Amino acid sequence: MKDGWEMKRLGDVCEVIAGQSPEGRYYNIDGQGMPFYQGKKDFGETFVGSPTTWTTHVTKIAKMGDILMSVRAPVGPVNFSTDEICIGRGLAGIRCTDELSRYFLFYQLLFLQPIIAGKEGAVFASINKSEIEALPIFFVSIHEQQRIVALLDEAFAAIATAKANAEKNLKNARALFDSYLNSVFSRRGDGWVENKLVSLTSKIGSGATPRGGGESYKMEGTSLIRSLNVHDPGFRYSKLAFLDDGQADGLSNVIVQPGDVLLNITGASVARCCIVPDDVLPARVNQHVSIIRPIASKLDSDFLHYLLISKYYKDQLLQTGAEGGATRQAITKAQIQDFTVGYPEDRGEQQSIVSKLNALCAETQRLEAIYQKKLVALDALKKSILHQAFTGEL
């Protein structure tokens, strides 16, 4: 350990206030009483957000400037209180004495968060007051604390700016593609015609969930494509389910073929769309996914996929799904059949449009990957700087 550094128990230099939730009958959303904060969901980036709940029966209080720690899953995240507030059982308040800068402790708790949450991927369900008080923390003179805090403030501000720029660039890359995609299908050129999908497809239909539900799925066999696998603009392999031969035979009316367009037709994911990848075949779909199989001589599958994920047509699908006043959005087979789409009658023109969209989509995904890597690198940089700060290297 660096000269002048020592270890202390957090409880030796701080007061820890364990939260206690009032009875629900004392809660209100009308601003009566004291602002009430329950847990991590109330946290902002550094300071707690504006209150959404108040209580007329105050239990445990955190003061302005106290550090708040989430003590129930997730364990360890920290924020500052911006006012005198009532804290529930999902939080603990940590109040520093004069010899410890609350900002120095805040940064140190960020550094210790992986340890507090649990080593090797284990996650504690909760941490209590005694365990927080027993946390070992680094302690140095108040002047050294202030020096380290100033360096960390400067570094973290620069990282926050870089992160905001990367997130903006990531958003802009996707927005550029979406804008161009929408313009293709909302501003049609010469030679475009309109028809209902029923006249352009050889199959429209959804499947079913095998008897026994999730417990009946296998580790291998015929793929069962569910709504969680169907995303704009591509297929997601995570949690892909499999069926044995008998189960697959029971869904022989929804055999997925190469080039099939898949459309989610129920629930929150309604209108998400992709083309089935060849490497998941043979496959079936469940009742939440519809197969749309274009007639090859009339409509290109990739063209139809891009059409259905464009904002112009996506909005129409979402409106279709919301019709009828149902509490859960759903698109029926009849509605898909009656759905009118515009397209160039010349398939060569369809494929030319697809080629341009493929190229722009690939470039967009390349840029997104770059910005995602930058965000990961910036998070790693924050951890590295915190490590330097609390191993005496700053």
Image (cartoon, grey):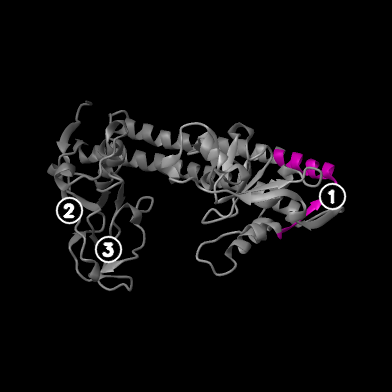
- Crowdedness of circle 3 by 10 Å Cα count: few (<14), some, many (20+)? many
Query: Is residue 330 magenta-colored?
Result: no
Q: Looking at the picture, how far across and down is residue 217, in whole percent?
A: 46, 39
Nearest-to-viewer mark from 1 and 3: 1
Is 68 situated above or below 215? below
Residue type beneath disc 1:
Glu
- Crowdedness of circle 2 by 10 Å Cα count: few (<14), some, many (20+)? some
Cα distance between the residues tagged 3 and 2: 15 Å
Q: Secondary structure at mark 2?
A: strand
**212 vs 42, nearest the viewer:** 212
Instruction: Name the residue: 53% across, 67% down.
Output: 326
Cα distance between the residues tagged 1 and 3: 62 Å
Residue type beneath disc 2:
Ile
Residue position for label 3: 36
Residue position for label 2: 17
**144 vs 272, nearest the viewer:** 272
Q: Looking at the picture, how far across and down is residue 28, in whole percent?
A: 29, 71
| Residue 244 circle label | none
Q: Looking at the picture, how far across and down is residue 365, in whole percent?
A: 61, 38
Between discs 3 and 2, the one toward the N terminus? 2
Instruction: Name the residue: 15% across, 36% down.
Output: 8
Q: Looking at the picture, how far across and down is residue 204, in whole percent?
A: 67, 51
Residue position for label 1: 345
179 sits to left or right of 74: right
Q: Secondary structure at mark 1?
A: loop
**338 vs 69, nearest the viewer:** 338
